[in-house]
């Protein structure tokens, strides 16, 4: 695996659980257009499109959030209502070659750090997106309980 020397673009997502349906609820993913600080709710042909890295991060985030819910349910862990997953996917370059790298952050305020860390790693081990990237790109997994 090669390390990125220069980051060219970053796609970011912040995914929260829906208040409807608990662990199996819907996910609301808001994407923003490159160069815009405002969320873009509609992507028409005349408007800028989200970066591929942002779309990948959004899909991965949805999958990982579902995996966290599944693991929590199996282990009888009550997830906080404000649980969230942040994923950043960088497109970068090393010499003439292009690569991806990612950072996943599980935010579970109020959960014990050891429980939250175990939950994050088990969810990472079953999430299909995490499996697909494992060994292919650099991925950092972070857990925040505060």
Image: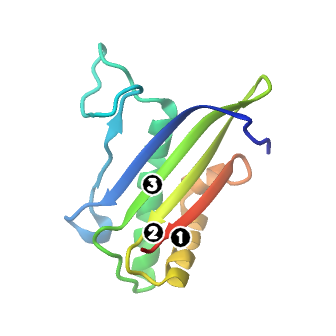
Neighbourhood count class around disc 1 (C-alpha, 10 Å): few under 14, some 14–19, many 20 upward? many
Neighbourhood count class around disc 3 (C-alpha, 10 Å): few under 14, some 14–19, many 20 upward? some
For marks 1 and 2, the one nearer the N-term is 2
To which residue does mark 2 refer?
68
Q: Dot 2: what SS?
A: helix
Proximity of marks 1 and 2: CB atoms separated by less than 8 Å: yes
Residue 120: give its label: 1
| Residue 57 position within the rendered picture, expressed as x and y whole percent measured from the top left | 48, 44
User: Residue 16 lies in what quarter of the image?
Assistant: bottom left
| Residue 20 position within the rendered picture, expressed as x and y whole percent measured from the top left | 19, 64
**Image quarter of the N terminus:** top right
For marks 3 and 2, the one nearer the N-term is 2
Q: In this view, does 48 lie to the left or right of 3?
A: left
Residue beneath the point at 35% across and 67% down: 83
Q: Nearer the viewer, mark 1 or mark 2?
A: 1
Residue at the outermost top position: 46
């Amino acid at each position: 695996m090669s390390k990125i020397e220069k980051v060219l673009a970053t796609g970011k997502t912040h995914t929260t659980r829906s208040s409807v349906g608990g662990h199996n609820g819907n996910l609301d993913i808001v994407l923003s257009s490159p160069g815009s600080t405002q969320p873009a709710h509609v992507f028409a042909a005349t408007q800028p499109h989200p970066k591929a890295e942002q779309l990948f991060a959004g899909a991965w985030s949805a999958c990982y959030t579902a995996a966290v819910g599944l693991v929590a349910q199996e282990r009888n862990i009550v997830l906080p209502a404000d649980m969230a997953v942040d994923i950043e996917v960088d497109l970068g370059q090393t010499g003439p070659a292009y690569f991806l790298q990612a950072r996943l952050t599980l935010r579970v305020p109020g959960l014990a750090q050891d429980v939250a860390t175990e939950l994050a790693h088990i969810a990472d081990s079953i999430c299909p997106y995490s499996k697909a990237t494992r060994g292919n790109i650099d991925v950092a997994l972070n857990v925040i309980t505060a």
